Image (cartoon, rainbow, N blue to C red):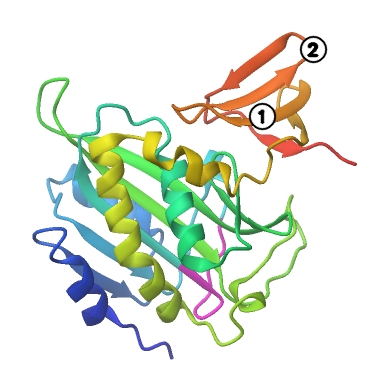
Amino acid sequence: MIRWQSESIWEAVAPLLAGFTVEVLPEIDSTNSELMRRARAGRTEPVLLVGERQTAGRGRLGRAWESAPGDSLTFSLGLEMAPADWSGLSLAVGVSVAESLDPAVRLKWPNDLWLQDRKLGGILIETASFGNGAATARYAVIGIGINIAPRPAAGLATPPAWVRELLPQADGSGVLQRLAAPLVRDVLGFAQAGFRPFHARFDARDALRDRPVTLSDGTAGTAHGVSEAGALLVHTAAGLRPITSSEVSVRPAAS
C-alpha cells in the first residue's frame, strides 16, 4: 500500500493557492472526468486529485491510459485560470514535470514525456467555462499520467519507459511529492506570462528538434523547435509550417 504524503503536499502548495486541497481515491473512472464533472456542477475550488486506479483513464485523442495501483501515478490538478493566451500550456506543464524528474527526461510535442524515445508519461488538459464575458476565467483540469514501474509494450504505438529506470526506489507518492509544488508554481507562472518564459526551457528538452518527422496527414519534414506561442515548427517541401492543432499527431520518421 502506498502511503501518500498528502499533508506535506498541501503544506507546500496551500500558500500558493487559497482553498487548495489534496484528495486520494482508491479507484475512479478518470481523475480528469471527475474534476470536469465537479466544475460543471459549480465546484471550482483548486484541488489535486489522485486516482490509485483508473478504470477509464484517457489520453489525448481519447486513447486509453491504463492505471494500476503502484504501477503508475495518475492525477489531475484543477484550478481557475485566466491567461491572456492558452497556447503552450501543455508544453509548460511538460517542462515543469520533466525538470522535477530527471535531466534525461525529454519532451515530445505536444504533451508526452519521453525517456530514450520511449513514452514515460502524458498530459491531458481540459477546460470548463463558467460565468459570462470573454475575459472570464475557465476551470483548467491538468491531467498527468506517469509510468512508475515496468509495463507491457503490447498494443502501444510507442514503447513504454518508467520512472524506476531513473529512480529505482521510486513510488507514486514520492514522485508526486517531487512534482506537485513546482507544477503549481509553473502553472501560475504560465497564467501570468504565458508560454514565453518556458520557451528556452522546452527547447532544452525538445525530443524532436532537428529530427525528421512525419505528420498524421502524411507530410514529411524536419522539426525545428517551437514558436513563442508553442506551435511546432516543421520544415517541409512547401516551407516552414507551424503545427498548432491538437488533432495532429507527430512522430519521428523511421530511421
User: Which residue is depicted at the point 16% across and 59% down?
Assistant: 16
Q: Amino acid at mark 1?
A: His
- What secondary structure is found at the residue carrying circle 2? loop
Magenta segment boundaries in residue numbering = 65-73
User: Which residue is depicted at the point 90% across and 41% down?
Assistant: 255
- What secondary structure is found at the residue carrying circle 1? strand
Secondary structure mostly taken by the magenta-highlighted segment of the chain: loop
**Hey, which quadrant is residue 87 in on the image?**
top left
Residue 197 place in picture, x, y as percent:
38, 39
Q: Work out whether residue 211 or residue 61 is closer to the camera in this orientation and state it.
A: 211
**Hey, which quadrant is residue 185 in on the image?**
bottom left
Q: Amino acid at mark 2?
A: Ala
Q: Residues within 10 Å of mark 2 (few under 14, many from 20)?
A: few
Q: Is residue 25 above or below residue 215?
A: below
Which label was assigned to residue 109?
Answer: none
Q: Is residue 245 above or below residue 4?
A: above
Q: Is residue 66 magenta?
A: yes
Report the side of 247 relative to 13 (left or right): right
Residue 77 place in picture, x, y as percent:
31, 56
Q: Is residue 148 above or below residue 153?
A: below
Instruction: Identify the residue under disc 1.
Output: 224
Instruction: Identify the residue under disc 2.
Output: 237
Label whose residue precedes the other's in the sequence (1 or 2): 1
Q: Is residue 208 magenta?
A: no
User: Which residue is depicted at the point 77% across and 62% down?
Assistant: 154
Quadrant containing the N terminus is: bottom left
Evaluate whether residue 207 shows in this view. yes
User: Which residue is depicted at the point 68% across and 37% down?
Assistant: 209
